[in-house]
Image (cartoon, rainbow, N blue to C red):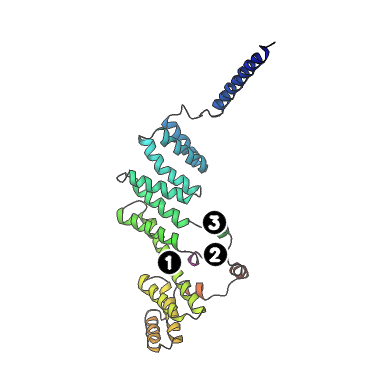
Amino acid sequence: MSHLPLRRILIGVLVLIGLLLGACSDTKDETTDEYSDWTAEQFYREARDALNDKKYDKAAKLYEKLEARYPFGKYATQAQLDVAYAYYKNDEPDSAIAAADRFIKLNPAHPNVDYAYYIKGLVNYNRGIGFVDRFLPTDSSQRDPGSTMDSFKDFEELLRRFPNSRYADDSRKRIIALRNNLAMHEIHVADFYMRREAYLAAARRSAEVIRKYQRTQAVPVALEIMEQAYRKLGMTQLADDARRIYELNYAEGAPGQAAKDVNYDPSAVEKVWKFIGLEE
C-alpha cells in the first residue's frame, strides 16, 4: 500500500509525457512547410501565374519565399523586381517603394533597373487615389502635393539616367500632367489667400507659379490673381505690369481648364463634397 502513491505518480508522469509528445507531433504536422520541396523555377512560375490572375497578395508571398529560399540566381533577382509590382497592385505603396529601392541598390547595372525607377514613379503617381476618388468629382491638385512631387522626381530621375528607356515616353507625359497638377495646387493656395484677404501672400504664391511653372495652364490664372492682389494692396504699378504681361501673352483669354478650376459654379454633389470638408 505504501508504494501506491509512487506508482500513481509514475503513471501520471508517463501519461503527461505521452500527451506532450502527441502535442509536439501535432504541432509539427501543422507547421509543415508545403513549399519545402519546391524549386526556384516552381516558385517563380506559381508567383507569375498568381500575378497574371490578379492574386497579388499570393504573388508577393511567393516571391518573398523564392528569394528567402533561393537568394542567388536569375529567379531571385527577377523576383526582387516583380515583387515591387505585386505590392503596387496590392495597394501596398510603401512596400512597393522599398522593394524597388532595394532592387536598385542591389542591381544598379541590371538591364531592367529602369523599370524599378518607373514603378516608384507609378506608385507615387497613384498614391492616395482610393475608392471615393473613382466615383465622386475630386481635384487632386487641391490635396497634399507630397506624393505628386515624389512622383515628379521619380520620373525625372528615370529620364535623367535612362533617356532612351522604353518607359521614357510615358514618363514624359506623366511629368507634364504632374507639373500642371503642382502648378494648379499653387493656384488653389493663392486663391485661398485671396478669399481670406491675405493679398500679399496671394501675390507671392502667384509669382512662384510664374517662376517655377512656365508654359503651364496655371500661369495666366496666376497673373490674374497677382493683378487682383496688387490692386487690393494699392500697388497700382505692379498690378498694371501683371495686366500688361497677361494681355501680351493671353489676348484671347486663359487657355485650357485652369481658370474654370478656380472660378466655377460647383455642382450640387461638389457643394456637398466641399461642405463636409473632404477636399480640404
Residue where numbered disc 2 is placed: 138
- What distance separates the C-alpha of mark 2 from that of mark 3? 11 Å
Quadrant position of the N terminus in the picture: top right
The amino acid beneath tag 1 is Leu
Discs 1, 2 touching: Cβ within 8 Å: no
Look at 41% across and 40% down and name the residue there. 79
Identify which residue, 40 or 252, lies in the foreground. Answer: 40
The percent position of residue 87, horizontal first and vertical second, equals 47, 46
Secondary structure under the numbered disc 3 in the rendered image: loop
The amino acid beneath tag 2 is Thr
Please report the bounds of the magenta region as a residue range: 138-144
Is 111 located above or below residue 224 in the figure?
A: above
Residue where numbered disc 1 is placed: 182
Mark closer to the chain start, 1 or 2? 2
- What distance separates the C-alpha of mark 1 from that of mark 3? 20 Å
Q: Is residue 252 visible in the rendered structure shown here?
A: no
